[in-house]
Image (tube, coloured by chain):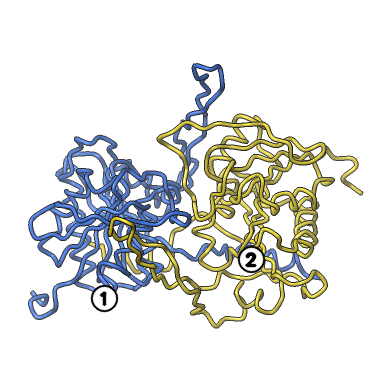
Chain colours: A blue, B yellow
Amino acid sequence: MAKKNKKRPVILVTNDDGVNAPGINNLVDAIKDLGKIVVVAPDKPQSGMGHAITIGYPLRLQSVKLAEDVEAWSCSGTPVDCVKLAVDKILHRKPDICLSGINHGPNHSINVIYSGTMSAAIEAAIESIPSVGFSLLDYSMEADFEGAKKFARIIVEKLLESKSDKHLCLNVNIPAVEADLINGIKVCRQAYAKYEEDFDERKDPNGKKYYWLTGAFVNFDKGKDTDVWALANNYVSVVPVQFDLTNYVLKSKLEKTFKK
Amino acid sequence: MAKKNKKRPVILVTNDDGVNAPGINNLVDAIKDLGKIVVVAPDKPQSGMGHAITIGYPLRLQSVKLAEDVEAWSCSGTPVDCVKLAVDKILHRKPDICLSGINHGPNHSINVIYSGTMSAAIEAAIESIPSVGFSLLDYSMEADFEGAKKFARIIVEKLLESKSDKHLCLNVNIPAVEADLINGIKVCRQAYAKYEEDFDERKDPNGKKYYWLTGAFVNFDKGKDTDVWALANNYVSVVPVQFDLTNYVLKSKLEKTFKK
């Protein structure tokens, strides 16, 4: 209600599955009455691009049609490029919040580091724009987004109501179950869970080897305060993410190691 | 001396400037008598690739000639792909340490997040391989690597002598001055310093706009315990890096926000 007296917030929306993915449409649909929505998303899938930026090539923007009353652009670059370009060349200002997703597939635990979805959100936080990345634990393009939409809206409303830390960045994962079966929201830490790589070795028609990245997901972390635990128990996991990668515990130890 | 009785350590070397960059050759040259060296590095420059991995395409490996007694491979993927593929398909074991670099150009402060050099090192740490990324504050392919080589060797020797944390990851930057002018090593935290983007807008011969990423580096962090400060004062900066991105301070605050 207080919002009536305020200027409508500007909400930048991006993703890593590309501007045509159902996930980003579902995200826009869930929150489009909460502010002025501007979508700037990759023109093709960019999963696993992490925090890559485009240095050696120039970038292109193309106006696209997404939803009624929504300004939308496709960008030839990475998710991080999208955020940078949106702020500098489309919005000409910092948006009030940046939302990324809804990703088709999980970005919990170590996935946060490989994820283009989360890297876009982290980039926003670096640029002093509060941000949230949303991911649904379902890779399918026909996934049921109802639970994800419901909780995305709850979270965005809460953040718009309160004054967020300007470097706030949330990694939100939603279990792939019907909306009614979700038990609520758990604020978590990132689990130490990762993929155990096992490259699939093949030979091309010329007899030369090539390798496909595959692997099994293994959770080494038995904590009940992790995102992996929350999701396994049908909670929406919310992990606040930082971009200061300094390991302060190790820093104190190393000061002794490197003392003259 | 104690090393004579031990098995020679296996040292995996990678980078993001590509297997033909002078930096990786200088790194190998600086440390090649300290263990069995295996190089697996990108077949082309991969700067700014962050923690990108290759999902939609298969990867290739090609044996290359680098230095005497050094097994070397070029890989068609990203720096992170190189580490994964090296462990699974070349070494068939975890190396004792993974070294990345020497990068042509700085990777201090927020650069750690965009840097392929550092992402390779972080990937190793995720896989329980102690790692170091080295970067010289000189983008030139003709840079003077003497100071960088001297300190890379000192740091690698120290780490091989001691029992490192298996998730140890160091971000080492070396000032671009003569070796004799370097004042020593400082263990630091990552500065909050970043690029203020300013895309260069141009028109192609068909009149369509395109954008080059450019920007000015700005240090918002006046602390004297940061990597930026250390480098400005001719110290080698050593920042221990973590891959648990959980913001624990914000986690406590958010638990209140999301309480029912």
Under mark 1, the amino acid is Lys
Of residues A257 and A205, the one nearer the viewer is: A205
Quadrant (top left, top right, bottom left, bottom right) of the C terminus of chain B:
bottom left
Of A135 and A240, nearer the camera is: A135
Q: Where B118 falls versus A212 (above or below)?
A: below
Q: Residues within 10 Å of mark 2 (few under 14, many from 20)?
A: some
Horizontal relation, residue B95 to residue A233: left or right: right
- Percent coordinates x, y for residue A25 in the rendering: 17, 49
Mark 1: which secondary structure? loop
Of all chains, the one bearing label 1 is: A
**In 3D space, how far apart are the residues under numbered discs 2 and 1 (Cα atoms)?**
32 Å
Q: Are marks 2 and 1 in contact (CB under 8 Å)?
A: no
Q: Secondary structure under badge 2?
A: helix
Against A219, is B233 above or below?
below
The residue wearing badge 1 is: A163
Q: Which mark is residue A251?
A: 2
Q: Residue A73 at what x, y percent from top left?
A: 23, 56
Pick whichever of labels 2 and 1 is earlier in the sequence. Answer: 1
Going 32% across and 43% down the picture, which residue do you hit? Answer: A45
**The image quarter in which residue B92 lies:** top right
Q: Which mark is residue B108?
A: none
Residue drawn at (78%, 39%) of the image: B36
Image coords of residue B89 (percent x, y): 61, 29
The image shows residue B141, relative to residue A256, as above or below, that is above
Nearest the viewer among B90 and A137 is B90
Tell me the amino acid under the disc marked 2: Lys
- Left-right relation of A39 to B149: left
